[in-house]
């Protein structure tokens, strides 16, 4: 593999990483709004039923996309845990 080919692969990876960061930022903007809504309306920070449905849905999508469902679940669980932490913080403010 020439350095040129490797550089193009790496540029593609860098572009994808940037897109992931921007998508996560947008996701967290919305979940922060959800956290404020929940805090204002006395709703609990976590919704275990919704979380499980989302995990199952994304595991299925991962399988369709040829991505390891276990990895997708770990990733989503990490994101959900962070969202819940934000929701708890909004409730304390």
Image (cartoon, helix red, strand yellow):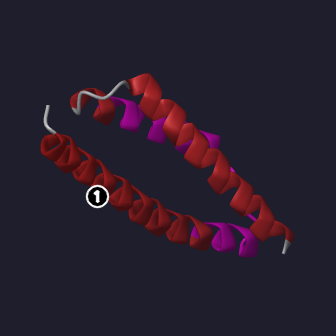
Is 55 placed above or below 68 here? below
In the foreground, 30 or 44: 30
Instruction: Pinpoint residue 17: horizontal percent, then vertical percent.
Output: 37, 53
Q: Which residues are magenta?
A: 34-60
User: Circle 1 — which element?
Assistant: helix
Quadrant location of the C terminus in the rendered image: bottom right
What secondary structure do most residues of the magenta stretch adopt?
helix
Q: Which residue is mark 1?
A: 15
Category of crowding for the residue at label 1, using alpha-carbon neighbours closer than 10 angstroms: few (below 14), some (14–19), many (at least 20): few
Residue 4 in view in this figure:
yes
In the foreground, 91 or 9: 9
Quadrant location of the N terminus in the rendered image: top left
Residue 50, magenta (yes or no): yes
Is 47 placed above or below 52 here? below
Residue 44 in view in this figure:
no
Taking the image as shown, residue 93 lies to the left or right of residue 22, namely right
Residue drawn at (17%, 49%), measured in percent from left and top?
8
Instruction: Pinpoint residue 13: horizontal percent, then vertical percent.
Output: 29, 48
Taking the image as shown, residue 66 lies to the left or right of residue 46, namely left
Residue drawn at (23%, 33%), measured in percent from left and top?
65
């Amino acid at each position: 593999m020439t350095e040129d080919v490797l550089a193009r692969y790496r540029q593609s990876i860098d572009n994808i990483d940037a897109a992931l960061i921007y998508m996560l930022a947008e996701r967290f903007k919305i979940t922060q709004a959800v956290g404020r809504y929940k805090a204002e309306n006395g709703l609990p920070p976590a919704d275990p039923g919704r979380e499980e449905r989302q995990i199952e849905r994304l595991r299925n999508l991962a399988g369709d996309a040829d991505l390891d469902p276990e990895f997708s679940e770990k990733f989503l669980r990490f994101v959900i845990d962070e969202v819940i932490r934000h929701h708890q913080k909004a409730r304390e403010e």
